[in-house]
Amino acid sequence: MKTSRFRGVVVTAVVAGLALLLLVVATAGDVYSPLGNADPGPLTTYGFAVVRFMADAAAAGCFGGLVFAAFVALGRRGGSLSADAYAASRFAAGSAACWLAAAVVAVPFSAASASGLPVSRILRPEVFLPTFSATEEPRAWLCVAVAAAVTTALAWPAMAWRTVVAATVTAGVGLLPLVAVGHVSVGAGHDLATNALFWHVPAATAWLGALVALLARSRRGPIPELTLVRYRRLSLMCFVVTALSGAVAGFALPRPDGLLSRYGLVLGLETALLVAAGFGIAVWRRRRFVVAELVLLALGTGGSAALTALVPPAFVNHPATVQETVLGYGLDAPQTLARLVGDWRPDLLFLPLALIAVTAYLLGVRRLRRRGDHWPPGRVVAWVAGWVIVVVVTSSGLGVYAPGTFSLHMVTHMALNMFAPVLLVLGGPVTLALRALPANRDVPGAREWIASLLHAPVTRFFAHPAVAAILFAGSFYALYFSGLFGQAMLYHWAHQLMKVHFLVTGYLFAWVAVGADRTPRQVPHLARLGMLFAVMPFHAFFGVILMSKQALIAGTYYHYLALPWAGDLLADQRLGGGIAWASGEIPMVVMVVALLVQWSRDDERKARRADRHGENDLDAYNAMLAELAARRN
């Protein structure tokens, strides 16, 4: 594709998406009074819509371009970027700069839209500062701007693959703040819708941006076949994730009356555009469908931006209760054993992650066994059991009722932070991946990417025993004794981030202590044992402090929920302390036993190697004596 045609295609796609957005905004009617806001005027209304669309488009170019540079374009051995990857990275860096500019402009526009004031007035410091501190969306845009600035700084001078990956992660994080504070984050069902969009937005953004990067690559000549294969896999994966998560987010809103509203019609149009673009992936091998695919995705981006300018019908027709506002669902019925076991509400962040992790692991084991290699069944059991624990404590009735009482929350905390990670690290997933994935001698692939990240400086830093122990043990005190816990429980995104933190820090500590996978730092067994014994008292002290504490932790949150069956909150908090004290010792003992077993097996392997070395030395000595005897004769 020539440069002039490439620019024409991109401009056409942008104009089409922007036209759809402006059409919806122009025909939306009054979208402010249903939310209790004043109309800020046409400049703010249309200006914010355009800025939002441009920010979304730039974010797609940034994130998708980085994904293309890191995982689609062919790389070089040794971790340096190829010409294609470097070009995609520079394209992403330019998009990141545009993303930064749009996010900065969006801060006052979002404040004006939320306050019902014209943007010209909101720019006054005495008006802007109170509005900024009182509303969430301007602060979310500021977080986006920070992420875009860091991404620009990483991607612009990037010459190494790891740097591009770091920029990709940063850009991906920058996509999430607006999801956390958008329309889907409030009201009934917002837990399901928000979790679904945590998958939907990065997948759709990567799909669109990678497609633009692919078109940009076509200007420089024929595209390598492996690059095309990787892009098809990426686009197909993004299509599946986007379609499934979008359907869940759409149906989590609602009631049937919402499907025939303007909001429902735009949502249906966006879904149809997505399906049409997905159909293009299937026929691309036979037709030049890529340009139409780009236009369809740009229209879908315009539709997505238009949804943020409309009022979901559930806001007006079905006002949320206090519990639905905070949790996304009601907890009027008291917790019983039957409800803890049978009342399932899927956590759409951890449940898909568990399914992907278990499926990929079992496929890796099958590949090893098909080529005749052995993989211990105990590791398979440990890996699957670890993810079963994660699913149970996040999606079963236990996970549903955990936000209601401190004691049940502590059960989920200990399960995610201690019980599940011990089993997961004993599964040895990294070792399995390195053995099951094919080695690529010419072009780095998934196996080489994993090996590179495993030995990255940031991995070595977090794999240091002191760092892992501080993050693991210190998190308890920093979270519960600083007021962070009460603030995090008020927001679904913060609650999810807290659970992710539990699982990640627990996995990191268990990996360094007893993991079946080798760590970048070779820590002696005696040092690992000392690390375990050093951490044990901190968990015991934490439980004792909770049991003796007179002040209620997160009292504002629990009083706000006002669950009639919750009972004495302070007594429940002390019960949570007892759970932390009692259950914390069990996984520690399991880790000590596992470490001693690993130590014993390692000594046995060293003894066998020493015996073989000794036998070889003896054979060499006897051969030398025989040779000397032969010379004398």
Image (cartoon, rainbow, N blue to C red):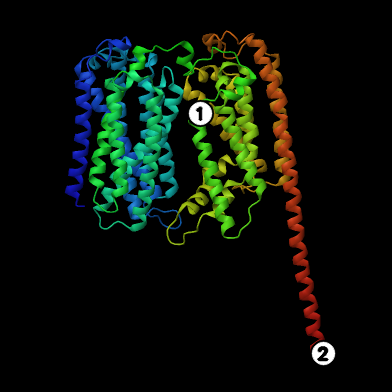
Query: Which amino acid lies under the numbered mark 1 shown in the image of this protein?
Result: Asp
- Horizontal side of residue 31 vs 432, given as left or right: left
SS label for mark 1: loop
Q: Which residue is drawn at 26% across and 42% down?
A: 294
In this view of the protein, which residue sits in the foreground, 257 or 233? 257
- Mark drawn on residue 626: none
* Alpha-carbon span between mark 2 and mark 1: 83 Å
SS label for mark 2: helix
* Residue 333 horizontal/vertical position (percent): 56, 13
* Residue 409 horizontal/vertical position (percent): 60, 21
Which of pointers 2 and 1 lies earlier in the amino acid sequence? Answer: 1
Q: In this view, does 109 lie above or below 530?
A: above
* Residue 408 horizontal/vertical position (percent): 62, 20
Q: Number of labelled discs?
A: 2
Q: Residue furthest front?
A: 256
* Res 44 quadrant in image: top left
Classify mark 2: residues with Cα within 10 Å, few (<14), some (14-19) or many (20+): few
Instruction: Classify the position of the C terminus by image quarter.
Output: bottom right
Q: Which residue is drawn at 35% across and 37% down?
A: 204
Residue identifier under label 1: 347
* Residue 261 horizontal/vertical position (percent): 28, 20
Q: Can residue 467 be seen in this view?
A: no
Classify mark 1: residues with Cα within 10 Å, few (<14), some (14-19) or many (20+): many
- Mark drawn on residue 632: 2
* Res 460 quadrant in image: top right
Q: Residue at x 64, y 43 (%)?
A: 381
In this view of the protein, which residue sits in the foreground, 234 or 449? 234
In this view of the protein, which residue sits in the foreground, 114 or 332? 332
- Horizontal side of residue 135 vs 117, given as left or right: right
- Horizontal side of residue 184 vs 376, given as left or right: left
Query: Which amino acid lies under the numbered mark 2 shown in the image of this protein?
Result: Arg
Q: Is residue 52 visible?
A: yes
